[in-house]
Amino acid sequence: MKKLKILMAASEVVPFAKSGGLADVAGALPKALRNLGHDVRVVMPRYYGIDKQKYQLKPLLGSLGVPMGIMGEEWAEVYEGVLPQSDVPVYFIEYERYFGREGLYDENGVAYSDNDNRFIFLSKAVMQLAKKLHFQPDILHANDWHTAILPLLLNTTYRSDPHFAQTASVLSIHNLQHQGEFYKGVMDVLDVGWEHFTVDELECYDRVNLLKGGIVHANAFNTVSKRYAQEIGTEAFGWGLEGVVLAHQAKLFGILNGVDYEEWSPAIDPFIIQHYDSGAMGGKALCKRALQERFGLPVRADVPLFGLVGRLAEQKGIGLLAEAVRGLLEMDIQIVLLGTGESWAEAFFSEIAGAYPSKFGCYIGYRNDLAHQIEAGSDFFLMPSLFEPCGLNQIYSLRYGTLPIVRATGGLDDTITNYQPHQGKGTGFKFYDSTADALYGTVKWAVETYYHDPKGVKQLIANAMAERFSWEESARGYEAMYAFSLRERFGSHPEVAR
């Protein structure tokens, strides 16, 4: 494939800003694409939590004019840095009015009232920045609702702009639940013409739906697992956009996220007390002991230890765990939990930790070092998600020999194979119904396997640790989508010659 010029826009990018999986992808995929020879540039906001000195950000000369429709032209500063351990440029859009705040999208759980203008501004700044840099992208890559208007802008405002004459667009959906729905008056800020406020484009129940517009106008779009690409065309997972997804499914791709094994590997992990790998597992027992000590649990090598790291949100199946947890703790097991989220969940699991101090450990908040230590020290990892576009912790768990217990949805179903005891196959334990009973029954199955089938557990761990989900493989999937998008836009086009 001819090497491409790719301009990727995202509202969050690791390590600069993160609230979820989008940031992980936006921080890792550009490096993988660069390793394949493509010229990739990334654009994101310069939130005021991003330290210019720490990341050695340098200002670009001259301000950037951003046309905001009825609001007139607004002016941004631009800073340039690189993704760590790479030469991939990252351009930071600085505008205090929109990005000089504590949070990315909200404060104390309350969304900013001007999120529509904030991210329309970001998306329009991306287009203007490409011209300022004299960078003519082959691919304009938008991510989630925050930058989903980029394909729309390419097809409207910039349709006749020679700078984008050879540009196709793609949209990656990391979570369809969040769609960017706003009051229809924002059409005057978008300034693409009210003729696009129709049920076939931007209109959704008399409001503007930015993600819907992105799906309609992108030359291709994808989700971050094959299973989730199928699920979003159903009423259960489509969040009202299933009809739009099905209408455009000919250009829909499912591309599984990769994992950065430079960060997530027990052989080199700087956060764990003892390194280990599939050929030398002794260090895992020491990691388990250290984890029990850290949470104040009895130090027992013989008890199965279950870990959970994640947002305490309904999507993650926290309600199922809350319903099942007292029954689970009647078994001879231990559970440690790291996370933050809905206030009821934080209070509930803190109470459980107080009621079962020898069986349940809880840390409300997030610590990266502790997340690594839970992956390394646990025997099993719980992910009872109601839906999961991709999921990464289950893949981390495989590498650490920590057997995942997952609900068979989205990327969890794609990445984990169910234990088949008589064949010695599988990499974890799966359940299908989104019920507390199903979660309880599967944990019980895992516990019985742990106590009564140690050979089976050893084989499962070996299978799990042999799995690999590399970003290079994911990047090849994105190459295929880019090629499709160029064909979709231009037909037989020199950019997609192989």
Image: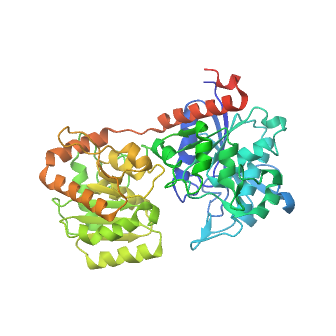
Viewer-nearest residue: 63 or 173 = 173
Viewer-nearest residue: 295 or 52 = 295
Residue drawn at 63 percent across, 51 percent down: 10
Q: In this view, does 226 lie above or below 242?
A: above
Residue drawn at 22 percent across, 59 percent down: 444
Task: Give the image quarter of residue 218.
Answer: top right
- Horizontal side of residue 301 vs 234, given as left or right: left
- x%, y% of residue 132? 80, 43
Residue drawn at 72 percent across, 64 percent down: 98
Looking at the figure, which quarter contains the C terminus? top right
Viewer-nearest residue: 331 or 95 = 331
- x%, y% of residue 238? 54, 53
- Horizontal side of residue 471 vs 7, given as left or right: left
Looking at the figure, which quarter contains the N terminus? top right
Is residue 291 something one can see in this rendering?
Answer: yes
- x%, y% of residue 297? 24, 69
Is residue 57 something one can see in this rendering?
Answer: no
- Horizontal side of residue 460 vs 488, given as left or right: left
> How many labels, in total?
0
